[in-house]
Image (tube, rainbow, N blue to C red):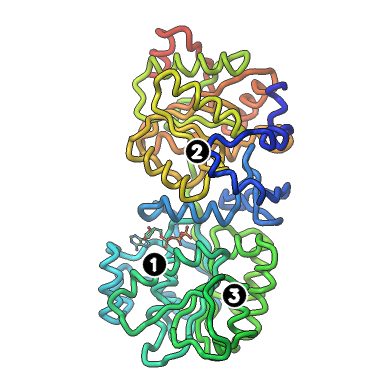
């Protein structure tokens, strides 16, 4: 098969690829590919179909991607951009806080916040928290990329909002999946550690409740289907008594079949005075239309994603003939440079598996990350790599977003990133190599070129970013050392 046809032949390849870790194969049959993907103004990939996006050769489940981000994240994502605030009533004063004290939280809740290691509100929290805690209640639509502190913000708002003396459900929070709901629940539990009278229930599949009894938990978090059943069929919750409704990950929610309608049906049961809060990492038209339906008269807070830059990254390409040749070039490269850690991107799982096997045979300590693994397994691989247990991480695109490994100094595009039409996928290129050269450090990116088509792609990338990609001869050690010094 010609290397050029990777993008087109991916279905066939993956269907015929044996799982190298057989236990992980159970994810494969859930594939529902979508063609309708594009980036929003924040550079996030969005999809209007099915909750899946195709990312190069892998299909990515948006909810899983979100869960992976949560599992591997250790701290706030840095963002120096200004928050944009659009107030419903532009004449009312705009409050923002620089400390948690200014919010006048209950002491036990403040203790919970500090106990989590939060010293001050994150950029989005500075504006979102006073708005969510304001009296009379205000509706809010907030958008910022994953990891900027949204979950922590609305968890705090819910914990602050409830009256523990009232033994009925007052805050309802819905999330796209069982696993995501559990993650949010953990944050609430941790933050509310010193608020023993505030109770939390999980409205998720498998959590069976007796029909007709009313829940006493003040906060209920769950998935739209179960929550809808609990409100309507089982009547465990009186929706008219809900005074705060939180809809998290709106972009993922509407990309999942059925969730959009269920969310709207839950919303319809709520009282008109209920405070509505909606959060999303991306914000393109379909999310916006949905948000407007669910959140009347909103205040809007948006934090633009910080631009990734190629300024501190030296980019090269190596001309090769076929995959064996690319492999030799890679070994030469790796053998001659002092590289802290490297990430190598392949287009398909099959290629990633082949490369991992061969690098391992050469004596390298290699980790493999691919879409057939369960989310928890992917998170564990990333954690090992972060801790330096392996020096090389071979991967398909599934993990190109979200992982920040500061010590990665080399990114190799063993296969160049292409879109479904076989053109340069500039956005993916930026995400892949943008992770090296972080925080002013120098990074290197090496692209393997194995055909006229892939040379065209390099030219397209050069033009797009207006940055030179220099030819590298990996058999010429001296030249390579001087270029890459
Ligand atoms: N004020 C803060 N100070 C320090 N760390 C914080 C603060 N707020 C949140 N964090 C931490 O930052 C990380 C990201 O926060 P959070 O999960 O709330 O972000 P998010 O925008 O909801 O992203 P996602 O939707 O992917 O979870 C978490 O590890 C959280 O514990």
Could you tell which of marks 3 and 2 lies nearer the N-terminus? 3
Q: Secondary structure at mark 1?
A: helix
- Decide: is 468 above or below 7: above
Q: Quadrant of the C terminus?
A: top left
Give the residue pinned by disc 3. Answer: 226
Ligand 1 occupies quarter:
bottom left
Q: Which mark is residue 369?
A: 2
Question: Is 56 in front, or is 317?
Answer: 56
* Mark 2 Cα-neighbour bin, 10 Å: few <14, some 14–19, many ≥20: many
Report the residue at 67% width, 79% height from top: 265
Q: Marks 1 and 3, how far apart in space?
A: 21 Å
Please state the horizontal and vertical placement of residue 128, each as a whole percent of the image.
44, 70
Question: Is 420 in front, or is 427?
Answer: 420
| Whether residue 89 can be seen here | no
Q: In the drawing, does residue 31 fall left or right of residue 177?
A: right
Specify whether tag 1 is near ligand 1 (CB below 8 Å).
Answer: yes
In the rendered structure, are the residues bearing label 1 and label 2 in contact, judged by CB atoms less than 8 Å apart? no
Please state the horizontal and vertical placement of residue 62, each as a whole percent of the image.
59, 54
Disc number lying in front (1 or 3): 3
Q: Which mark is residue 187?
A: 1
Please state the horizontal and vertical placement of residue 454, each as a whole percent of the image.
65, 23
- Decide: is 249 above or below 339: below
- Decide: is 448 above or below 141: above
- Counting labels gives 3
Specify whether tag 2 is near ligand 1 (CB below 8 Å).
Answer: no
Q: Marks 3 and 2, how far apart in space?
A: 33 Å
Question: Is 173 in front, or is 419?
Answer: 173
- Decide: is 362 above or below 180: above
Q: Secondary structure at mark 2?
A: strand
Q: Marks 1 and 2, how far apart in space?
A: 27 Å
Report the residue at 57% width, 91% height from top: 212
């Amino acid at each position: 098969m010609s290397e050029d046809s990777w993008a087109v032949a991916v279905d066939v390849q993956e269907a015929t690829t044996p799982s190298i870790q057989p236990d992980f194969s159970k994810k494969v049959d859930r594939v529902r590919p979508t063609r309708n993907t594009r980036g929003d103004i924040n550079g996030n990939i969005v999809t209007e179909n099915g909750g899946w996006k195709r990312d190069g050769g892998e299909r990515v489940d948006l909810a899983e991607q979100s869960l992976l981000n949560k599992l591997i994240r250790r701290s706030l994502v840095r963002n120096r951009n200004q928050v944009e605030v659009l107030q419903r009533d532009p004449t009312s004063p705009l409050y923002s806080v620089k400390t948690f004290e200014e919010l006048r939280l209950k002491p036990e809740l403040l203790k919970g916040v500090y106990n989590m290691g939060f010293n001050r509100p994150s950029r989005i929290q500075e504006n979102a928290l006073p708005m969510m805690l304001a009296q009379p209640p205000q509706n809010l639509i907030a958008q910022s990329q994953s990891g900027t502190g949204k979950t922590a913000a609305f968890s705090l708002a819910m914990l602050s909002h409830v009256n523990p003396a009232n033994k009925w459900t007052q805050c309802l929070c819905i999330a796209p999946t069982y696993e995501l709901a559990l993650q949010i629940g953990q944050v609430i539990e941790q933050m509310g550690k010193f608020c023993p009278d505030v109770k939390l229930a999980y409205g998720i599949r498998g959590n069976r409740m007796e029909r007709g009894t009313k829940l006493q938990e003040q906060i209920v978090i769950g998935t739209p289907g179960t929550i809808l059943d609990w409100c309507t069929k089982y009547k465990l919750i009186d929706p008219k008594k809900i005074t705060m409704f939180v809809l998290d990950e709106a972009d993922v929610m509407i990309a999942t079949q059925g969730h959009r309608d269920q969310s709207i049906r839950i919303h319809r049961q709520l009282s008109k005075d209920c405070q509505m809060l909606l959060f999303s990492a991306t914000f393109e038209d379909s999310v916006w239309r949905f948000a407007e339906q669910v959140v009347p008269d909103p205040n809007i807070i948006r934090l633009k994603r910080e631009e990734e830059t190629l300024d501190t990254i030296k980019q090269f390409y190596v001309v090769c003939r076929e995959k064996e040749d690319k492999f030799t070039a890679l070994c030469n490269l790796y053998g001659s440079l002092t590289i802290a850690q490297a990430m190598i991107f392949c287009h398909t799982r099959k290629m990633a598996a082949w490369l991992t096997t061969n690098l391992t045979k050469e004596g390298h300590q290699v980790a493999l990350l691919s879409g057939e693994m369960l989310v928890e397994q992917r998170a564990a691989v990333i954690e090992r790599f972060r801790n330096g247990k392996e020096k090389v991480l071979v991967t398909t695109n599934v993990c190109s977003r979200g992982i920040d490994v500061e010590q990665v100094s080399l990114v190799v595009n063993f296969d160049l990133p292409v879109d479904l039409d076989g053109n340069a996928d500039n956005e993916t290129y930026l995400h892949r190599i943008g992770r090296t050269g972080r925080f002013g450090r120098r990074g290197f990116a090496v692209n393997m070129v194995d055909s006229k088509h892939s040379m065209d792609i390099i030219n397209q990338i050069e033009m797009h970013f207006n940055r030179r990609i220099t030819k590298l001869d990996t058999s010429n050690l001296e030249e390579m050392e001087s270029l890459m010094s």
